[in-house]
Amino acid sequence: MSESVDIKTAIREIRDFPKPGILFRDITTVLRDPASLRASIDAIVGELRGMDFDVVAGPESRGFIFSMPVAYALHKGFVPARKKGKLPAKTVSRGYQLEYGEEYIEMHADAFEPGSRVVVVDDLLATGGTCKALFGLIESMGGVVAGAVFLIELTELGGRDKLAGYDTRSIVRY
């Protein structure tokens, strides 16, 4: 287990990024500090211990940073969920709305066996749109969403409400 680290303190705040009025929670300060990085991964792993699941899915791109080492630590497989056109084999896709248009998330059609229990690990739960689309994609492929763990949750944006009915956990809340 990692030494005692205040992960919330390690997250840098950047005002007016990417546009005026936004307070951006920057995880690069967590990533560059070995103790903070270890504490973050250990905290996510701790949330998942005892949960029944087969594979970890991580959405592009910052989700990869946390989901891959979590899968490794828990002896599970890892499945990347990517933006449209980034995966080389046959894919399954799901669209979702953004404030400025539509985006797509894809997984390989053979990413996991039907009936597999899938956990989603990502860096941030904000509005919940991307994760809701990923949950729908997993289910459309015959998977079962076992839950999701986020390093950061921005509670005022209501993302958890979009994920109602799913086991949704977060390490740091703002």
Image (tube, grey):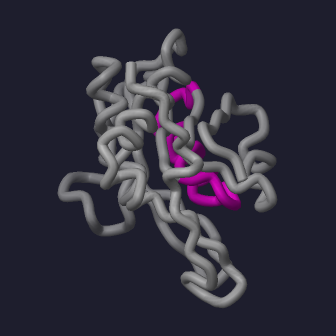
Quarter where residue 74 is shown: top left
Count up the numbered dots.
Answer: 0
Image: magenta residue range:
124-146
- Quarter of the figure with residue 16: bottom right
Determine whether 129 is above or below 145 in the image: below
Farthest-out residue, bottom: 20
**Residue 146 spot, x, y in % from top left:** 57, 25
Residue 162 visible somewhere in the drawing: yes
Residue at 30% from the left image edge and 34% from the top image edge: 69
In the rendered structure, the answer to whether residue 152 lies left or right of residue 62 reads right
Q: Determine whether, in the image, residue 94 is placed left or right of residue 84.
A: right
Residue visible at 27% across and 65% down? 86
Residue occupying the far top of the picture: 50
**Rendering coords of residue 165 (x, y %):** 76, 32
Question: How far across and down, in percent of the image, does residue 45 sit?
Answer: 45, 25
Give the vertical position of 79 relative to 101 (above or below): above
Q: In which quadrant will I find the N terminus?
A: top left
Residue 107 appears in the picture as rendered: no
Q: Residue at horizontal 43%, vertical 34%?
A: 39
Residue 109 versus residue 17: which sits nearer the camera?
A: 17
User: Image quadrant of residue 66?
Assistant: top left
Question: What percent of the width, then of the height, locates residue 112?
Answer: 34, 31
Task: Tell me: 117 left or right of 169.
Answer: left
Residue 10 magenta-drawn?
no
Foreground residue among 100 and 8: 8
Q: Is residue 129 magenta?
A: yes
Q: Residue at x 61, y 88 (%)?
A: 19
